[in-house]
Structures are given as C-alpha cells and as structure tokens.
Amino acid sequence: MSNRREEIFEYLPLREPTLIILLSLADGEKHGYAILKDVAEISNGKVRLSTGTLYEALARLLDQGLIERATDLPQAGREDRHPGRPRKAYRLTLKGGQVIGAEISRLQALVATAQQRLDFAASE
C-alpha cells in the first residue's frame, strides 16, 4: 500500500489548471467544451484555457491514468448534439480522485501552517 501512496504523491503539487480540470470531472463525466466552461466557473474566471491547452492537458492526464475516456454516454451524446465530429467525454479515474484528495490535503496543511505563522506574527 505504501507504494500506491508514494505513487499518488509523485503527482504533487498539481498546477492550478490541472487541479481545476480534475475537479471539473469530480462530479461526473464531461466533454471538452463543458470542461472549459466549468474551469472558468470553478476559478471565478481567473483560469481560462484555450482549447489547445485543454486538450494537451487532457492527453497528459489520460497518459497518467488520472482520467479516462467515457465510453457509455447515453445522455451526453443526445443532449449536446452538434454538427461535426462526435464529442469525446472524459471522467475521473479512482487514481485521479486519490490525487485530488492528496492535493487538497497538501493545500489544507499549507494553509494551516500559513495561518499559524500569520497568527504568531500578529501577536508579536
């Protein structure tokens, strides 16, 4: 189990856009355009990805096994029909969820340390 745990920590720290892409997929599968919109929403408009940057990130996350292509798309394909190529949807893997959890824990520890130091500095 420690090897698995060590493997998860090899991905940390995550870059902010990567974390937000993974968070976008945490509540279910999405196609690229939906991820782009969700990333902007999650970040309150501070992170805006070009389609090229998004698809490069998705390819890297696929290679790392943090996400996978969704093969069963009963609703996404019907509701979002548009001309041209069919949309590819992506979903978070178990490993991807574990990486998000580890990153959130890392960030929470960092914030706790920062708060302690700021509290100490303010009390002097």
Image (cartoon, rainbow, N blue to C red):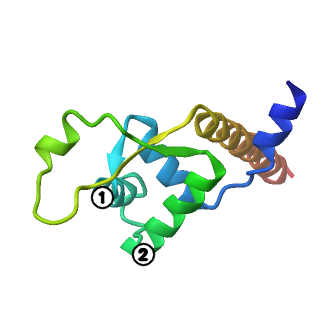
Which amino acid, by three-letter code, is at mark 1? Answer: Lys
Q: Which residue is mark 1?
A: 37
The spot of residue 13 in percent (x, y) is: 73, 54
- Considering every residue shown, the one lying at the far top of the view is 1
Where is residue 61 drawn, in percent x and y? 58, 54
Q: How far is mark 2 from mark 1, CA to CA?
A: 14 Å
**Residue at the (34%, 61%) spot, across then down:** 36
Q: Is residue 12 above or below residue 51?
A: above
Q: Which residue is mark 2?
A: 52
**Foreground residue, 58 or 116?**
58
Q: Are marks 2 and 1 in contact (CB under 8 Å)?
A: no
Describe residue 100's horizontal placement relative to residue 42 as left or right: right
User: Which amino acid type corresponds to the residue marked 2 in the rendered image?
Assistant: Gly
Mark 2: few, some, or many residues within 10 Å (few <14, many ≥20)? few
Q: Identify the residue at image location x=65%, y=40%.
A: 104
Residue 115 spot, x, y in % from top left? 74, 45
Q: Mark 2 against mark 1, which lies toward the viewer?
A: 2
Closer to us: 17 or 77: 77
